C-alpha cells in the first residue's frame, strides 16, 4: 500500500466518524421503541446495536481509500491468523480471572453471587452474537485504522497514539465520573498494551481476542454495579476500585505482551 497523505487520513477518519455516529444515533432513538423491555439482555442488545455502523464503516472506508483488501486492516500480510485471536482471548481471559481472584480477599464484602439463569441465558445469547461486533468494531478502528495511520513511527510511539485515541472516547463512561485521571490512565494502558502487541505481531488479531475476552468477562463472569454496559454476570461487585484497576493493568498489560510473544 502506498503511503497516504495526512490530509486524506484525516478526511477518511472524518467519514468513518460520520458513518458511525449518525446511524448509531438513529439506532439509539429507534431501539427503545422497537425493543422497549427492561430486561438486561434487551438493554444490552440496544447498546451493542449502535456499534454495527462502526463495524461496517471502518473496513469499507479502508477498502475504498487504500484500494487494498479489508483483511490488510487486520494483518499487514492480508492473511488473518485466527489462532492469534484465540490466543489473545484465552490469555486475557485468564489474566482477568487472576486479577479478580487476587482482588477478592481484599474486597470480599463487595462481591455477591448474582447468577440468574432466566437473565443469564438470553443475555449470553446476545453477548455471543453482538459482543464480537462491538469489540471488533473498536479494534478495527483503534488498533487497525490508527496503527496503519501511524505505521511510519516507532512501535512505542504507535502504541502511545493508539492508547491515547482509545482512552479519550471512554471519558464519558460512568467509571470516569469520580476518578477521571485514573480511569483514563487505565484505558490508555489497555489500549497501548494491545497496540504494542499488535505492532509486534504485524496484525491486530491478539487485540481482537483480548478485547472480546475483556468485555465478555465483565459481562458474564464478574461484573460491577454502574458499568457502562448492563450486566447479568455470575458474580457482581458493588464497587469498582479504579485505582486498583489501574495498578492491575500496570501488571496485566506487560504480562499480556510477554505471554503472547511468538516463540521460534
Image: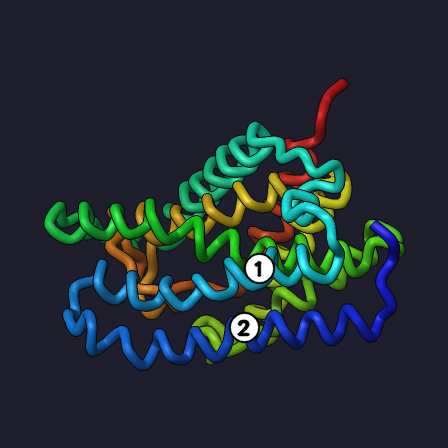
Q: Nearer the viewer, mark 2 or mark 1?
A: 2
Q: Residue at x 55, y 45 (%)?
A: 208
Estimate the x, y position of residue 218 in percent, counting from the top left: 38, 52
Task: Depth check: give the residue in front, 86 or 90.
Answer: 86
Estimate the x, y position of residue 119 in percent, counting from the top left: 15, 53
Find out whether the residues at labels 2 and 1 contact each other: C-beta distance under 8 Å: no
The residue identified by callout 1 is 246
Q: Is label 2 in a helix, a strand or a loop?
A: helix
Relative placement, left or right, of 36 versus 238 is: left
Task: Depth check: give the residue in front, 70 or 125.
Answer: 70
Circle nearer the N terminus (2, 1): 2
Split into 4 quadrants, where in the image is the C terminus? top right
Estimate the x, y position of residue 56 in percent, counting from the top left: 51, 59
The residue identified by callout 2 is 19
In this orientation, does residue 212 appear? yes
- Give the total number of marks visible in the rendering: 2
Amino acid at each position: 500500500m502506498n503511503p497516504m497523505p495526512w490530509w486524506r487520513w484525516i478526511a477518511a477518519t472524518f467519514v468513518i466518524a460520520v458513518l458511525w455516529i449518525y446511524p448509531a444515533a438513529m439506532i439509539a432513538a429507534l431501539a427503545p421503541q422497537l425493543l422497549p423491555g427492561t430486561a438486561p439482555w434487551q438493554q444490552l442488545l440496544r447498546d451493542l446495536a449502535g456499534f454495527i455502523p462502526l463495524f461496517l464503516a471502518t473496513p469499507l472506508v479502508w477498502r475504498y481509500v487504500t484500494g487494498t483488501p479489508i483483511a490488510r486492516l487486520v494483518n499487514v500480510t492480508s492473511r488473518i491468523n485466527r489462532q492469534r485471536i484465540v490466543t489473545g482471548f484465552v490469555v486475557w481471559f485468564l489474566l482477568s480471572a487472576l486479577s479478580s481472584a487476587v482482588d477478592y480477599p481484599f474486597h470480599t464484602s463487595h462481591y455477591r453471587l448474582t447468577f440468574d439463569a432466566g437473565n443469564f441465558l438470553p443475555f449470553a445469547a446476545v453477548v455471543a452474537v453482538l459482543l464480537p461486533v462491538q469489540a471488533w468494531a473498536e479494534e478495527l478502528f483503534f488498533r487497525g485504522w490508527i496503527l496503519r495511520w501511524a505505521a511510519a513511527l516507532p512501535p512505542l510511539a504507535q502504541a502511545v497514539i493508539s492508547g491515547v485515541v482509545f482512552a479519550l472516547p471512554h471519558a464519558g463512561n460512568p467509571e470516569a465520573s469520580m476518578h477521571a485521571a485514573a480511569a483514563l490512565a487505565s484505558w490508555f494502558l489497555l489500549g497501548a498494551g494491545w497496540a504494542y502487541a499488535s505492532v509486534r505481531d504485524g496484525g491486530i488479531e491478539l487485540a481482537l481476542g483480548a478485547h472480546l475476552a475483556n468485555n465478555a468477562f465483565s459481562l458474564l463472569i464478574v461484573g460491577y454495579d454502574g458499568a457502562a454496559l448492563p450486566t447479568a454476570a455470575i458474580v457482581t461487585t458493588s464497587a469498582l476500585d479504579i485505582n486498583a484497576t489501574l495498578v492491575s493493568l500496570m501488571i496485566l498489560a506487560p504480562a499480556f505482551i510477554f505471554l503472547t510473544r511468538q516463540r521460534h
